[in-house]
Amino acid sequence: MPDADRDNTHRPERPRYGDVVSGIRDLIIEGELAPGSRVPERVLCEKFGVSRTPLREALKVLASEGLIDLLPNRGARIVDLTEDDIEEMFQVMGALESLAGELAARKITEEDLAELRALHYQMALHFTRGERMPYFRLNQQIHEKIFATSGNATLVKVYRGLSGRLRRARYIANISRARWAEAVEEHERILAALESRDGAMLGRILKDHLRKTCETVRHALMPVEE
Amino acid sequence: MPDADRDNTHRPERPRYGDVVSGIRDLIIEGELAPGSRVPERVLCEKFGVSRTPLREALKVLASEGLIDLLPNRGARIVDLTEDDIEEMFQVMGALESLAGELAARKITEEDLAELRALHYQMALHFTRGERMPYFRLNQQIHEKIFATSGNATLVKVYRGLSGRLRRARYIANISRARWAEAVEEHERILAALESRDGAMLGRILKDHLRKTCETVRHALMPVEE
DNA sequence: AATTTGCATTTTGCATGCAAAACGGTATTT
DNA sequence: AAATACCGTTTTGCATGCAAAATGCAAATT
């Protein structure tokens, strides 16, 4: 039975196919679509108020991004990352971030630095206040900013792809207070390396920082699974 | 007018949606779909003998892979890489390959080494015979093998994504004889570093090799554009 | 003559329909 | 009773239809 407010024709505004893609992404990050769970097209169609055609297009994109698995004739399944997957992804992100750091150190302007400093001290404030969620967001912004400063758009895209797949895991991995303090310290070293334009040093710090973040996520994630 | 041999129903075998994706990929690599050209859905439907639904799903995937641009309400356009795009992509591939090399050097077995040696000397033979196309293929296989040996599936996927976008450019970039000889030499050093399990050295060699390959592609590509 | 307007044609975005494949549960067989 | 065969239901894959958006080109306006 079609809803009364829906008709058989193309509506100029509202849920386009792209909205469905980001909508499903959000559902995955928020955990409404649990990893490993099977997702019938019907359910998602109703959730977004679109028919199966744009929804299936969205699923294809999400599958090629690695967020869901598409089993022929058996529908979509939310990808469930194993501990090894996470380690692999962080390893690749380490190489990417190291490159981003080297490039950023060469190109960074005083304005970029000022912006990063502002983000950093805002983040540090959230740390001292114990505000995990705002800290998390600022942290992401800082790393995004470093990639943006690298000036390499391809690098940014590849990073975003991996980062998006890991977002859910990082989101639910509760950092320990001790590791949290350590991470803030590492961020101070990151800032210092950028200020002195020491690309090689920055690359090393970032790679090391990511390696430790990986350990945090892995350990925080696996035992409890939510 | 529908063809006589096509009906309104689901056919169990033959052109599935996935075939269309790789089919279009091939058309792009072979240059049948020129970079920058607009591609109406209609012609692709006829080329592959499918209706618009699976074709559009394929286009979405190719767009998210970065092979085509999808302009809302205005169809698909084959991505035309600029010189800067190519440089960016090689820079990222350099970081990836460097990581792959370091990991591979740690994990490589005698059997892997034997396989790589076989590929290498086969490739060297094609070089001495001046057989560009077979050389090109073996070269790709060697790099693929190094990535596979790294044991990091994510790394392989990210590499394949970038490599696929660059394939067309590398395919038509005619290497100079001088640079060709140099590349073969670099490959010997790659093999030597793997044999001595020197990951750091291998990483550097690979990054340098990619940097030079990038220059080759850029210069061979831009002046003539075909 | 150059630019703009109008309209027929083409192309895109989406909903729907239909058949094949998978699923679920009961009945049948061993 | 356990395993298997059967059959209705659900879900998937694809073709098609229709309306909105874009496109192309001739006629009208300045």
Image: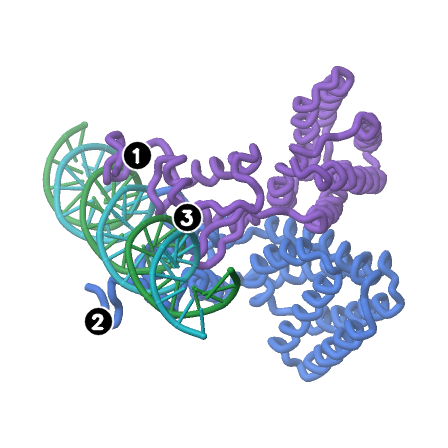
Chain colours: A purple, B blue, C cyan, D green
- Asked whether the viewer can see residue B28, the reply is yes
Q: Which mark is residue B4?
A: 2
Q: Residue at x 58, y 43 (%)?
A: A35
Residue D20 spot, x, y in % from top left? 25, 37
Give the residue type at disc 1.
Answer: Pro
Front one among B156 and A178: A178
- Alpha-carbon neighbours of circle 3 within 10 Å: few (<14), some, or many (≥20)? many
- Residue A50 sits in quarter: top left
Give the residue type at disc 2.
Answer: Ala
Q: Secondary structure at mark 3?
A: helix
Q: Are marks 2 and 1 on the same chain?
A: no
Cβ–Cβ under 8 Å for marks 1 and 3: no
Q: Are marks 3 and 2 on the same chain?
A: no
- Alpha-carbon neighbours of circle 2 within 10 Å: few (<14), some, or many (≥20)? few
Q: Is residue B173 above or below residue A1?
A: below
Q: Residue at x 54, y 53 (%)?
A: B81
Give the residue type at disc 3.
Answer: Glu
Cβ–Cβ under 8 Å for marks 3 and 2: no
Q: Is residue A200 above or below residue B183?
A: above
Task: Please give the count of numbered marks on the rendered protein.
Answer: 3
Q: Secondary structure at mark 1?
A: loop
- Residue A137 sits in quarter: top right
Q: Which mark is residue A57?
A: 3
The chain identifier of the residue carrying mark 1 reads A
The chain identifier of the residue carrying mark 3 reads A
In the displayed structure image, the side of residue A99 where residue B30 appears, left or right: left
